[in-house]
């Protein structure tokens, strides 16, 4: 990997964004750029069925400085899945853990990239009242205590502007961001939703 350059003069700094290619993180990417940040889009391959090339093209089209794809499959399987199977980690006796177990692996890969790409900030699209933000941010701060987190769904400047899905759809249209959702069907469903976890864990409800 070629050495990263420092953020350009006049920018607010460089942000590593946990990117999914969906409506929320694509709008967050465009919004961060609008706010004056340089943004690197980050995705982790933990074995999910995902069109990473399409995500890369979309991120760069929206304006990302760079797209980084980290191969985390081996670490995820050996360090998280095997021990969880041995420990019989079944949430409330109903379903196998998948998405939550991947978060520490993803966070570690992100913090490695923060150092490599000289990012001062990290951002994500987690809801402001969910547990995913806690999983990610505690891991971020444990590994890189000096990094600053930009959490748009906890930022009044962001969530008051995008009070509903229609506002995100309007912003996407304004910025020329291609999205799967429509005004009639504003939420990610079906296969798009299931891609958040490896296929082994596809049937869990979260």
Image: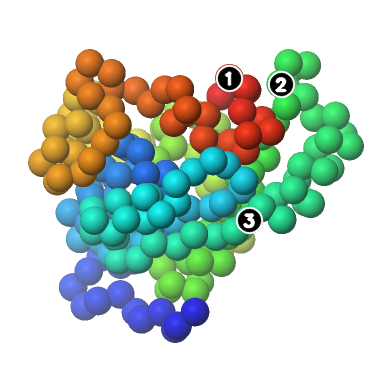
**Pointer 3 and pointer 2: residues touching (CB < 8 Å)?**
no
Q: Is residue 91 left or right of residue 41?
A: right
Q: What whole-number distance in Å separates the C-alpha atoms at marks 1 and 3? A: 23 Å
* Residue placed under numbered mark 2 in the picture: 95
Q: Residues within 10 Å of mark 2 (few under 14, many from 20)?
A: some
Task: Tell me residue 150's x, y (percent).
Answer: 37, 50
The tag earlier along the polypeptide, 1 or 3, is 3
Q: In the figure, 63 relative to 162: above or below? A: below
**Quarter-wise, where is residue 162 in the image?**
top left
Q: In the figure, 162 relative to 142: above or below? A: above
* Residue placed under numbered mark 1 in the picture: 205
Q: In the figure, 61 relative to 116: above or below? A: above
In this view of the protein, which residue sits in the foreground, 159 or 94? 94
Residue at (44% x, 37% y) in the render = 126
The tag earlier along the polypeptide, 2 or 1, is 2
**Pointer 2 and pointer 1: residues touching (CB < 8 Å)?**
yes
Q: Secondary structure at mark 2?
A: strand
Residue at (56% x, 24% y) in the render = 206
Task: Tell me residue 30's x, y (percent).
Answer: 23, 50
* Residue placed under numbered mark 3 in the picture: 72
The tag earlier along the polypeptide, 3 or 2, is 3
């Amino acid at each position: 990997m070629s050495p990263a350059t420092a953020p350009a003069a006049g920018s607010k700094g460089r942000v590593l964004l946990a990117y999914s290619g969906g409506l929320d993180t694509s709008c967050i990417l465009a919004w961060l750029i609008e706010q004056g940040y340089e943004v690197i889009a980050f995705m982790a391959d933990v074995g999910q069925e995902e069109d990473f090339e399409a995500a890369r093209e979309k991120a760069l089209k929206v304006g990302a400085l760079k797209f980084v794809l980290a191969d985390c499959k081996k670490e995820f399987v050996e360090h998280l899945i095997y021990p969880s199977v041995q420990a019989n980690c079944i949430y409330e006796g109903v379903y196998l853990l998948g998405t939550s177990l991947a978060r520490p692996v993803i966070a570690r890969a992100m913090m490695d990239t923060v150092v490599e790409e000289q990012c001062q900030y990290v951002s994500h699209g987690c809801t402001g009242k969910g547990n995913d933000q806690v999983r990610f941010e505690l891991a971020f701060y444990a590994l890189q205590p000096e990094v600053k987190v930009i959490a748009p769904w906890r930022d009044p400047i962001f969530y008051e502007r995008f009070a509903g899905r229609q506002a995100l759809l309007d912003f996407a249209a304004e910025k020329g961001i291609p999205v799967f959702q429509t005004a009639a069907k504003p939420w990610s469903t079906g296969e798009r939703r299931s891609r958040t976890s490896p296929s082994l864990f596809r049937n869990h409800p979260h």
